[in-house]
Image: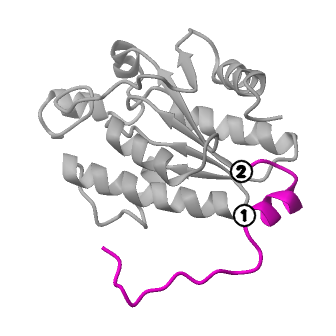
Amino acid sequence: MTDTNVVWHQYTIDKQERAKSLGQKPAVIWLTGLSGSGKSTLANLLEKKLHQHSHHTYLLDGDNVRHGLCGDLGFDDKARVENIRRISEVSKLFVDAGLIVLTAFISPFRDDRRFCRSLLKEGEFIEVFVDTPLEVCEQRDPKGLYKKARAGDIKHFTGIDSEYQVPESPEVHFEYRDESPEDSAERLYLALKQKGYVS
């Protein structure tokens, strides 16, 4: 709850001016999916592709923000909600700066993703469902987390003993294919371009 003595200060340079100077339409490209689905890899390769096309970006990654901004949070449902609330507010600030923000977060709850959407204007939130089957994610298990979760060493692990709520109408439904990360990133970039989200 905001203190009644805290008043918003309006500055001269606004989001439109910043976006105009950068020559792009600011937005959040929100990648959601299970652990091991490929979100971080896709986000990294997609950012490289956007830079090749002279876009100005910033990438927020689930693990990385837990080293600082969200380092005080755990992984139960309440902490997950707060984690995404903070990321949503940060994403809004980056959009206000005129940037294209890429996020790679499991973000398992629909209400949390809706919250981020609610902070932004129409067309500024692009939900990308990285739809990789649980069995594929477990086979990959790059950090050994599924193995630990199955053994009971990690509690509240999404897809095992914590729910993942599938997006109902994402802007991009990115379905798994057995292909290289580079081919997947190219396919995602083309899907975003075809829908007019990037150039």
Work out whether 121 lies above or below 7. Answer: above
Q: Which mark is residue 74?
A: none
Decide which of tag 1 and tag 2 comes sooner along the chain.
Answer: 1
Q: Are marks 1 and 2 in contact (CB under 8 Å)?
A: yes
Foreground: 115 or 56? 115
Which labelled disc corresponds to residue 26? 2
Q: Nearer the viewer, residue 41 or 81?
A: 81
User: In this view, which residue lies farthest toward the bottom?
Assistant: 5
Quadrant position of the N terminus in the picture: bottom left
Q: Residue at x 71, y 55 (%)?
A: 99
Of 51 and 196, nearer the camera is: 196
Is residue 6 highlighted in magenta?
Answer: yes
SS at badge 2: loop
Residue drawn where x is 77% and y is 75% of the image:
13
Start and end of the magenta stretch?
A: 1-26
- Residue at 29%, 29% in the rendered image: 164
Read off the residue under disc 1.
15
Say left or right for 154 vs 146. left
Going by the numbered disc 2, the residue's amino acid type is Pro
In which quarter of the view is residue 93 placed?
bottom right
The amino acid on which the numbered mark 1 sits, given as a three-letter code, is Lys
